[in-house]
Amino acid sequence: MRMIVLTAFLSIGLAGEGAAAGTSSAPPDDLAALEQEWHDCVREAFRRQPRTQSRAASERSALDECRAGEDAYVAAAMRAEPSGGGRGGRRGLTERARAWAASVAAGVIDPVTSWFGVLER
């Protein structure tokens, strides 16, 4: 998951000034500021990696260097997320039925449709 996130942010552009790893000037509940600081840190850390190592190694090193910012952002996001929708975390019958229908569609209907598509070619 972190690799996908890093790749997406790096593809946006390697612009922006990096924040120092482990230091955060944002309030602990300001998600946007924490996210921006973490992204800036990752971009700057990636930019400092030696060009002789692989891209995957550079991405891992950049993520490791900015782990404190990532942890602060994830903790703030988890605090901000509403828990259970006010019903004690239990999903209603309609929500469970939709989830079941989606799983059936993904597990049965989609593969069968793709098999028929192969046969038509």
Image (tube, helix red, strand yellow):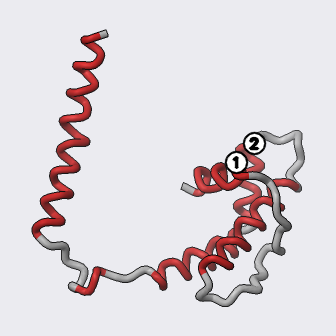
Tag shown at residue 120: none
Q: Vertically, is 91 above or below 100?
A: below
Q: Earlier in the sequence, mark 2 or mark 1?
A: 1
**Residue 17 vertical placement versus 9 (above, below):** below
Q: Residues within 10 Å of mark 2 (few under 14, many from 20)?
A: few
Question: What's the residue at 78%, 40% (across, down)?
Answer: 54
Of 34 and 12, nearer the camera is 12
Instruction: Locate residue 31: give its quadrant.
Output: bottom right
Q: Which residue is mark 2?
A: 55
Q: Which residue is mark 1?
A: 11
Q: Considering the image in quadrants, where does the N terminus appear?
A: bottom right
Task: Give the vertical position of 16 relative to 109 (above or below).
Answer: below
Nearest the camera: 71 or 11?
Answer: 11
At a point 69% along the width and 74% down the height, the residue shown is 69
Q: Quadrant of residue 6?
A: bottom right
Q: Secondary structure at mark 2?
A: helix
Q: Classify mark 1: helix, strand or loop.
A: helix
Expressed as whole percent of the image width and height from the top left, the position of residue 101 reads 16, 50
Q: Of the residues tagged 2 and 1, which is closer to the observer?
A: 1
CA–CA distance in space, label 2 to label 1: 13 Å
Q: Are marks 2 and 1 in contact (CB under 8 Å)?
A: no
Q: Say whether residue 6 is left or right of residue 81.
A: right
Residue at 71% across, 44% down: 56
Q: Seen from this angle, which residue lies furthest left? A: 93
